C-alpha cells in the first residue's frame, strides 16, 4: 500500500449534508447514492488494493443532468471522479473521500447507427461489447477490444484510450473515435468533432482521449464502425528461444505481413494457461506465438503459407494452423484466460509497459532478474506486434510484505521499459498506479506543458485530481522557465 | 546557426531553436515557422516579423523496419523519409499530399510540416490520418522550453496526448524539432476499379457499398468531368485478385469498371491526393470540406445552385475539394452550405486579401474558441508563433 492519496479537504467533508442536499434536486431520487452500504460498491475499481469511499455517487440519466451536477460541484468546490464501469486496472476510477462520483452507467443507449457512413452515435455509458453487438447483424463491429469489453464502457475507453489484442491492425480508441459530447468542469457542454473523419481547429478529440477524466466528462461519443473480415484464423508456433521467436516476429513484419493479432507468451505463461485451459500448448518450448490473420479462406491460406515459409529459419516447433472453429477457439482460450488462470495460482499485479520490440530479449531477461531479486515469480504475455508487454508479477497477499515487493518489482519493470525507449503504459492508463513514475518518462518541462494544458480545462484541480500527475510538483510557479533538467 | 536574411533564421539544433524562441519571446517578436514553405500560403496572413526555418534540423534519427517506426528531425525532406522507407519496402501509410502544384509553391516539403499540417491522403479512410500515425514529437514551446510527448512505440497512453494537439496546429503552438511516425509495409499489388458515368449520389452510394464491404478498400474517390469513381485495393497478389472479383460482383449495379494498375494507377491516386483536377484555373479559391459521405452530394449541389463550382470527392465522399471564384460572396455560400449539411470547411487556396478578409478555418462555437485560446496560451503565452494564422487571437 505505497500509493498516497491527497489529504481530504476537511471543509468539504464538514459540508457533506449541505452538498448532498444541493445535489438532490438535480437528479432523480434513485440516482443519488448516499448510504455507506451503497457507496461501498463504488469505493474501488479493478485495482482493488486501494479503496476510498466517496461522499456520494450520482448516476445521471442525461447530459443535462451531468451538466447540472458539474455546475453545482464547480460552484461549491467539490471534486468529481468520473466512472464508467469501474474496470480500470490503474486505479483511474478510485474515488477520494472529499469527492463525489459521477457514474455514466445509466447513459447506455445507442442514439444512431449509420451503416452507409460507417458511424455510430452512442451514450458514453454503453459497454464496449454492446456497440459491436448492436451492429453485428450487418456484419460490422467496433474495433478496439480491451479484454474487459463485456463490462467496460466507451466513456472509460475514451478516458484511458483503451486498446486490445487487435490494435496492430485497427488502432486504439483514439484512432476510432470521431465525435464527443463533453461536459466541462463548469457545466458547459461542448460538441467536439462530429460524424466526419476530421474536426476543425486544434485536435481536442485527441487531447480528450486518454485524459483520464481530468479534462471533462464524456456523455456521448461517435465512433467508426467497420465491416468485419470474412473470416479469421489463428495459428500457434513454439520456439526454443526468445531470440528465435523475436526474430520470427521481425521477419513476418519485415515481409510486409501485418497479422491482425500477434501474441507472445513466455514459458511460465504457457504453463499456467495450459494447466487451466488445456489448449494444447507445447510445454517444452521457451516462447510461443499466436498469430491470427483475416480474410476469406483463400486469403487466410495464402497468408499462412507465407508465414510458415518465413518462420522456417527460426525452427518453429509445434506449429499448428487452426483448421476448425474448435481448434481456433482452443488456441485463443489459453491466451484469453491468461489473467484468470494466473489468478488461480497466485495473486498478481498486471503491468502494462510498452517496449521497442527489438528489445524483447534484453527486457525479458532483466524482468526475470528483477522479479527473482524480490523472491517472486513472473509470467509474461506480450502484444508482440506493437511492443505492449503485460508481465504478471505473482505474489501471496497473505504473506506479509509480498504485495509491497510485487509493487516494487512492477515499478522496476516499468522503469526498465522507459529506459529501453518504451513507456509506462500502453493501454491501461496512468491512474494512481503509475502516477508517481511519471517523472521517469517525462522530465519537468514535459510534465509542465501537460499540466498547463490540464489547467486550461480544470484550473482548480476538481476533476479526478489524485491521478496521473505526481502530487508534488504540480505548482508550475516552481518550474524553471528555461534550461533542461536531467530526466 | 545560419541567418538566411535579416529576418530568417535556420537553427542547426534544438538548443538554437530554444535560444531563438526565448529571444523572440523576450522581444515579443511574432515568428513564422517554416519547413520547405510549400504550405506557407495556407491560413490567415499572419503578421510575423521573423521566420524560423527548420531546414537546418535535418536527418533521420531512428528507423527500425521491424518495429514499423521512423523518426526524423523536423526539417528532413519528406522525399528523404519516403526514399528511406522505400528501401525497406515500407511507407507513410497515410499518404501525405504534395500541395505544391495546388498552391503554386516550389520548395521541398518537410516531414515536420506533414505533422504540423496533419496532411493526409486517400488512404486516411483505411489507416488513419497523419495524426494517427504520429506517435512522438519534440518541440520548443513559446517559453523556449524543449518538450517531448509520446515516444517511439505505437501503444502509449502515458499522460496527456499532446502529439495530437500539435498535429494540425499549423505552427501556432510550437516549433517541432523531431517527429516519429508509425509506418506500414508497401503492398505487393495495388489495383483500382474505375466506374464511369456515375452521378455524385450514385458514386457516393457505390463508395459506401465498397467501404462497407469486408474487402479493405484503401482509396475511395469520385472525380469531376467523368474522371470516374475510383475504388482501390492493396495487398498480396492472391488477395487482391480475390477481392477484385468480389467487389465487381458486389458493385455490379454500378456498371462495368475499368481496371487501372501500376503507373497509371499511381498517377490517378496522386491526382486525388494532390487535388490535381482543381489545380487549374490557378486563380480559383479551393476549399477542403469535411462532412459525412452521404451528405456530401447534397452539400455540393446546394453550392452549385448558387455559384459556379467544381469539386472532387475523396474519403468515400467525406472529403470534398471544391473550387469557386475567389470572392467573399462565394465564401459565404460555401460556409452556409457546409453548415447546413453539418460539415466544416477550410479555405486552403486563395489570394492573401481574401484570406485576410474572411475566416479561413471553420469558425468555432464560443466555448470551443475559449478552449482554443486557452490551449494557445498554455503553449505560447506571449502569442509569438504564427499569431492569427488559424484564428484571430490564437
Image (cartoon, coloured by chain):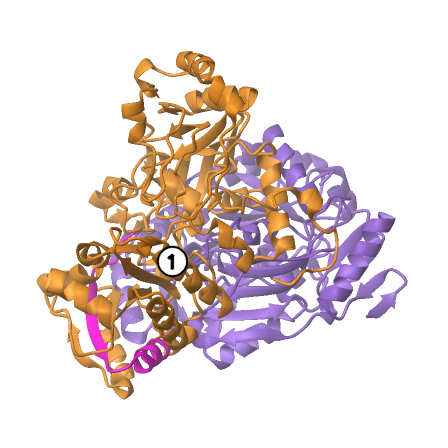
Chain colours: A orange, B purple
Q: Position of residue B211 (x, y in %)?
A: 35, 53
- At 28% from the left and 88% from the top, the residue drawn is A313
Magenta stretch containing residue A245, yes or no? Answer: yes
Q: Say if A30 sits above or below B374 in the image.
A: above
Left or right, B234 with respect to A192, comes to left
Chain ID at mark 1: A
Q: Quadrant of the C terminus of chain B?
A: top right
The image position of residue B130, as x and y in percent, is: 53, 58
Crowd class of label 1 (few under 14; some 14 to 19; many from 20; radius 10 Å): many
Could you tell me which secondary element the residue under label 1 belongs to?
loop
Residue to which mark 1 is pinned: A352
Q: Is residue A466 above or below residue B276?
A: above
Q: Is residue B36 above or below residue A34?
A: below
Q: Position of residue A377 (x, y in %)?
A: 28, 65
Q: Position of residue A235 (x, y in %)?
A: 20, 70
Magenta stretch, residue numbers? A227-251
Q: Going 54% across and 42% down the picture, which residue do you hit?
A: A204
Residue B64 is covered by the magenta coloring: no
Please give the count of numbered marks on the rendered protein. Answer: 1
Inspect this view and state whether residue A331 appears: no
> Can you name the residue that lies furthest to the right here?
B6
Identify which residue, A104 or B261, lies in the foreground.
Answer: A104
Amino acid at each position: 500500500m505505497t500509493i498516497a492519496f491527497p489529504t481530504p479537504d476537511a471543509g468539504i467533508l464538514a459540508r457533506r449534508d449541505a452538498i448532498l442536499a444541493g445535489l438532490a434536486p438535480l437528479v432523480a431520487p434513485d440516482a443519488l447514492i448516499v448510504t455507506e452500504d451503497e457507496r461501498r460498491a463504488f469505493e474501488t475499481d479493478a485495482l482493488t488494493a486501494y479503496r476510498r469511499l466517496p461522499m456520494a455517487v450520482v448516476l445521471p440519466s442525461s447530459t443535462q443532468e451531468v451538466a447540472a451536477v458539474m455546475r453545482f460541484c464547480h460552484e461549491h468546490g467539490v471534486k468529481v471522479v468520473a466512472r464508467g464501469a469501474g474496470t480500470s486496472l490503474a486505479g483511474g476510477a478510485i474515488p477520494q473521500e472529499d469527492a463525489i462520483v459521477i457514474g455514466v452507467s445509466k447513459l447506455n443507449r445507442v442514439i444512431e447507427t449509420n451503416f452507409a457512413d460507417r458511424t455510430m452515435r452512442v451514450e458514453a455509458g454503453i459497454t464496449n461489447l454492446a456497440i459491436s453487438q448492436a451492429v453485428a447483424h450487418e456484419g460490422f463491429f467496433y474495433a478496439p477490444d480491451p479484454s474487459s469489453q463485456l463490462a467496460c464502457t466507451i466513456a472509460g475507453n475514451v478516458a484511458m484510450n483503451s486498446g486490445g489484442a487487435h490494435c496492430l491492425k485497427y488502432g486504439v480508441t483514439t484512432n476510432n473515435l470521431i465525435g464527443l459530447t463533453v461536459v466541462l468542469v463548469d457545466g458547459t457542454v461542448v460538441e467536439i468533432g462530429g460524424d466526419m473523419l476530421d474536426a476543425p481547429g486544434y485536435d481536442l478529440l485527441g487531447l480528450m482521449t486518454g485524459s483520464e477524466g481530468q479534462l471533462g466528462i464524456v456523455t456521448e461519443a461517435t465512433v467508426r464502425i467497420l465491416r468485419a473480415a470474412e473470416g479469421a484464423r489463428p495459428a500457434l508456433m513454439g520456439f526454443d528461444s526468445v531470440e528465435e521467436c523475436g526474430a520470427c516476429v521481425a521477419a513476418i513484419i519485415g515481409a510486409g505481413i501485418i497479422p491482425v493479432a500477434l501474441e507472445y507468451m513466455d514459458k511460465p505463461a504457457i504453463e499456467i494457461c495450459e494447466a487451466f485451459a488445456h489448449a494444447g500448448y507445447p510445454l517444452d518450448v521457451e516462447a510461443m506465438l499466436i498469430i491470427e490473420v483475416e480474410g476469406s479462406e483463400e486469403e487466410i491460406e495464402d497468408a499462412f503459407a507465407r508465414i510458415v515459409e518465413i518462420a522456417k529459419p527460426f525452427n518453429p516447433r509445434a506449429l499448428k494452423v487452426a483448421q476448425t472453429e474448435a481448434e481456433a477457439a482452443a488456441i485463443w482460450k489459453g491466451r484469453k484466460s491468461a489473467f484468470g488462470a494466473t489468478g488461480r495460482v497466485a495473486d498478481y499485479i498486471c503491468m502494462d509497459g510498452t517496449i521497442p520490440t527489438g528489445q524483447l530479449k534484453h527486457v525479458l531477461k532483466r524482468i526475470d532478474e528483477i522479479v527473482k531479486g524480490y523472491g517472486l515469480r513472473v509470467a509474461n504475455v506480450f502484444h508482440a506486434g506493437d511492443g505492449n508487454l503485460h508481465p504478471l508479477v505473482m505474489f501471496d497477499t497473505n504473506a506479509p510484505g509480498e504485495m509491497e515487493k510485487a509493487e516494487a518489482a512492477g515499478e522496476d519493470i516499468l522503469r526498465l521499459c522507459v529506459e529501453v525507449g518504451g513507456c509506462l503504459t500502453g493501454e491501461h492508463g496512468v491512474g494512481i498506479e503509475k502516477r508517481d513514475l511519471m517523472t521517469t518518462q517525462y522530465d519537468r518541462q514535459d510534465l509542465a506543458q501537460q499540466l498547463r494544458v490540464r489547467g486550461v480545462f480544470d484550473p482548480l484541480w476538481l476533476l479526478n485530481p489524485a491521478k496521473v500527475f505526481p502530487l508534488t510538483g504540480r505548482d508550475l510557479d516552481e518550474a524553471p522557465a528555461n534550461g533542461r533538467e536531467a530526466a | 546557426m545560419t541567418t538566411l536574411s535579416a529576418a530568417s533564421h535556420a537553427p542547426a539544433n534544438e538548443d538554437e531553436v530554444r535560444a531563438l524562441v526565448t529571444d523572440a519571446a523576450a522581444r515579443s517578436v511574432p515568428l513564422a515557422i517554416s519547413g520547405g514553405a510549400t504550405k506557407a500560403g495556407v491560413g490567415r496572413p499572419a503578421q510575423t516579423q521573423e521566420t524560423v526555418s527548420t531546414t537546418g534540423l535535418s536527418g533521420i534519427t531512428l528507423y527500425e523496419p521491424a518495429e514499423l517506426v521512423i523518426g526524423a528531425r523536423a526539417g528532413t525532406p519528406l522525399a528523404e523519409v519516403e526514399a528511406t522507407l522505400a528501401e525497406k519496402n515500407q511507407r507513410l501509410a497515410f499518404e501525405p499530399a504534395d500541395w505544391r502544384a495546388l498552391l503554386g509553391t516550389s520548395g521541398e516539403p518537410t516531414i515536420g510540416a506533414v505533422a504540423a499540417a496533419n496532411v493526409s491522403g486517400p488512404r486516411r479512410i483505411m489507416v488513419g490520418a497523419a495524426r494517427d500515425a504520429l506517435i512522438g514529437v519534440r518541440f520548443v514551446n513559446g517559453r523556449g522550453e524543449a518538450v517531448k510527448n509520446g515516444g517511439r512505440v505505437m501503444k502509449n497512453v502515458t499522460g496527456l496526448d499532446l502529439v495530437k494537439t500539435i498535429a494540425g496546429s499549423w505552427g501556432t503552438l510550437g516549433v517541432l524539432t523531431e517527429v516519429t511516425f508509425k509506418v506500414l509495409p508497401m503492398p505487393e499489388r495495388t489495383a483500382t476499379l474505375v466506374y464511369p458515368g456515375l452521378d455524385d449520389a450514385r458514386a457516393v452510394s457505390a463508395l459506401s457499398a465498397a467501404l462497407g464491404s469486408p474487402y479493405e478498400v484503401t482509396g475511395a474517390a469520385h472525380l469531376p468531368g467523368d474522371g470516374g469513381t475510383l475504388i482501390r485495393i492493396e495487398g498480396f497478389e492472391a488477395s487482391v485478385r480475390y477481392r477484385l472479383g468480389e467487389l465487381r460482383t458486389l458493385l455490379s449495379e454500378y456498371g462495368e469498371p475499368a481496371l487501372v494498375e501500376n503507373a497509371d494507377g499511381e498517377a490517378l491516386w496522386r491526382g486525388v491526393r494532390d487535388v490535381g483536377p482543381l489545380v487549374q484555373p490557378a486563380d480559383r479559391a479551393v476549399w477542403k470540406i469535411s462532412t459525412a459521405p452521404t451528405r456530401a452530394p447534397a452539400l455540393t449541389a446546394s453550392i452549385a445552385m448558387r455559384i459556379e463550382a467544381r469539386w472532387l470527392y475523396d474519403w468515400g465522399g467525406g472529403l470534398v475539394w471544391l473550387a469557386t471564384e475567389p470572392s467573399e460572396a462565394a465564401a459565404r455560400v460555401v460556409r452556409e452550405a457546409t453548415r447546413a449539411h453539418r460539415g466544416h470547411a477550410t479555405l486552403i487556396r486563395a489570394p492573401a486579401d481574401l484570406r485576410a478578409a474572411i475566416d479561413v478555418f471553420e469558425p468555432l462555437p464560443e466555448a470551443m474558441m475559449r478552449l482554443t485560446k486557452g490551449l494557445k496560451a498554455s503553449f505560447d503565452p506571449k502569442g509569438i508563433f504564427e499569431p492569427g494564422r488559424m484564428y484571430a487571437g490564437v
